[in-house]
Amino acid sequence: MSILENEQVQAALIALIVVGLNALAQWVRGLNELISSIADVINLSGHNPVMLLDLGTVLRPEHFDGTDIHPNEAGYRAMAAAVMDVIARM
């Protein structure tokens, strides 16, 4: 019997993965807050405004094929349309 077939080992590995994913999510939230703060400072300067685009509001499950984190063609088209919308609002 392989050590990976042990239910306790599997449960411990799953717990480690969950803890790691939660830490990564917290880091990403912090990075997003930092980027937003930097954009606010740049925008206060009055030079070349920075407009943020949250792709979480653009991409949907149908924009992924399930093999990895990258969007499919429909996802790239949705992102391009969102960028064009931001440009049009500038």
Image (cartoon, grey):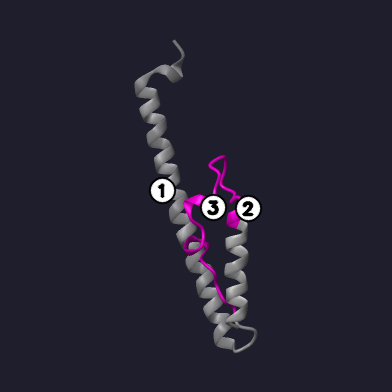
Q: Amino acid at mark 2?
A: Glu
Label 2 Cα neighbours within 10 Å, binned few <14 / some 14-19 / many ≥20: few
Horizontal side of 42 relative to 1 (left or right) equals right
**Residue shown at 54%/69% (left/top)?**
53
Locate residue 28, reporting x and y percent: 49, 57
Q: Earlier in the sequence, mark 2 or mark 1?
A: 1
Query: Residue placed farthest to the top in the image?
Result: 1
CA separation in Å, label 2 and label 1: 29 Å
Q: Which mark is residue 82?
A: none
Q: Is residue 69 part of the magenta span, yes or no?
A: yes
Residue 43 sits above or below residue 64 on the image: below
Secondary structure found at label 3:
helix
Q: Secondary structure at mark 2?
A: helix
What secondary structure prevails in the magenta region? loop
Q: Is residue 53 above or below residue 29?
A: below
Q: How many marks?
A: 3
On residue 63, the disc is 3
The disc at residue 22 is 1
Q: Please report the bounds of the magenta region as a residue range.
A: 50-75
| 29 falls in the magenta region | no
Q: Residues within 10 Å of mark 1 (few under 14, many from 20)?
A: few
Q: Which residue is mark 2?
A: 73
